[in-house]
Image (cartoon, rainbow, N blue to C red):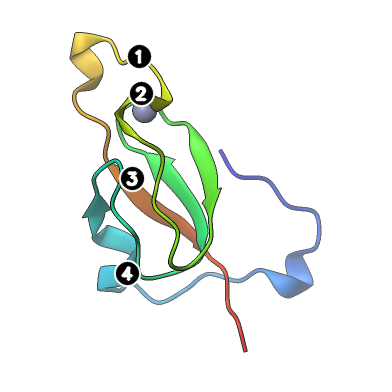
Amino acid sequence: MALYVDGNNVKTAKPSDAFTKEWKPGQTPDHAGIYRCKGCGDEIASNKGVQLPSQNHKQHATSQGAIRWQLLVYAQQG
Ligand SMILES: [Zn+2]
């Protein structure tokens, strides 16, 4: 679970496709931010235009299914 201490600079976003779209390993997401694997819960920081980690980011148990990255925290850039 992502953590923060400065609540003045983090706020809840309106639901949007950016937060529901799932990304496969090696794909390049549209937005910079923190992505969470829906299978194992690992979180990573990803920069705009940079590929997400490859298939072997972590060995999943069968019950966890495939690696699916989902945007958890959107990093706003000016
Ligand atoms: Zn995972």
- The quarter of the rendered structure image containing the N terminus is top right
The response on whether ligand 1 sits within 8 Å of label 4 is no
Local packing at callout 2 (Cα closer than 10 Å; few below 14, some 14-19, many 20+) is few
Mark-to-mark CA distance, 2 and 1: 6 Å
Please name the residue that numbered disc 3 is placed on.
69
The reply, left or right, for residue 3 in relation to residue 8 is left
Q: How many marks?
A: 4
Q: Is residue 5 above or below residue 14?
A: above
Identified at 28% across, 52% down, the residue is 27
Task: Give the residue at mark 4.
Answer: 18
**Nearer to us in this view, 52 or 75:** 52
At x 35%, y 62%, the residue is: 29
Give the CA separation, mark 4 to mark 2: 24 Å
Please state the horizontal and vertical placement of residue 12, each as a whole percent of the image.
53, 69
Do tag 2 and tag 1 residues touch (Cβ < 8 Å)? yes
- The residues bearing labels 2 and 3 have C-alpha atoms spaced at a distance of 13 Å
- Judge the density around disc 1: few (<14), some (14-19), many (≥20) Cα neighbours within 10 Å: few
Q: Is residue 55 above or below residue 1?
A: above
Asked if marks 2 and 3 touch (Cβ < 8 Å), the reply is no
Q: Which residue is mark 1?
A: 59
Q: Which residue was labeled with disc 2?
A: 56
13 or 71: nearer the eye? 71
The amino acid on which the numbered mark 2 sits, given as a three-letter code, is Asn
Q: Looking at the picture, which amino acid does disc 4 mark?
A: Ala
- In the image, 52: left or right of 20? right
For mark 3, give the secondary structure. Answer: strand
Q: Amino acid at mark 3?
A: Trp
Along the line of sight, which residue is nearer the eye, 46 or 21? 46
Question: Where residue 50 sits: x, y (%)?
Answer: 45, 58
Please, what is the three-letter code of the amino acid marked with disc 1? Answer: Gln
Residue at image point 20% right, 13% down: 63
Q: Earlier in the sequence, mark 3 or mark 4?
A: 4
